[in-house]
Image (tube, helix red, strand yellow):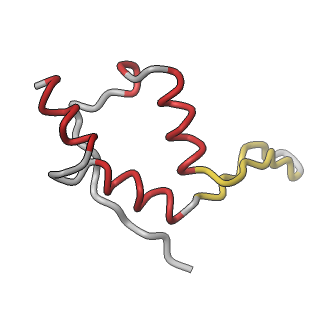
Amino acid sequence: MPRPRYPPISSSVRWDHLFPVERHRIVNLMIERIDLVHAGELQGIKVKWRELGWDTLIGEFAPAGIGAELVEIEG
């Protein structure tokens, strides 16, 4: 199944400028599940993304969304 492609969010929105509560909300919005993977010599994580979460986040940065207002304030 092909992965959906979404436009990048403005580079002026920086993760390290967000409050911890907002970081938590974004992660929960976008990620459904994370599994630790260990198969022989390979180790890593498997991420199950929430497709609706991406749409919600992108919608917040639409010209009339709260994210767009925050970008304007920072700029």
Spot the residue most to the bottom: 1
Q: Is residue 6 left or right of residue 50?
A: left
Residue 32 % position (x, y) = 66, 54
Tell me which residue sits at (34%, 61%) in the image: 6
Q: Quadrant of the C terminus?
A: top left
Residue 18 % position (x, y) = 40, 23
Q: Quadrant of the N terminus?
A: bottom right
Tell me which residue sits at (31%, 57%) in the image: 59
Spot the residue most to the right: 40
Using the image as rendered, state which of residue 31 and residue 39 is in the foreground. 31
Give the number of marks: 0
Q: Is residue 8 left or right of residue 53?
A: left
Residue 69 % position (x, y) = 18, 37
Residue 15 % position (x, y) = 40, 27
Tell me which residue sits at (60%, 44%) in the image: 28
Using the image as rendered, state which of residue 38 and residue 66 is in the foreground. 66
Tell me which residue sits at (54%, 51%) in the image: 30
* Above or below for 44 versus 32: above
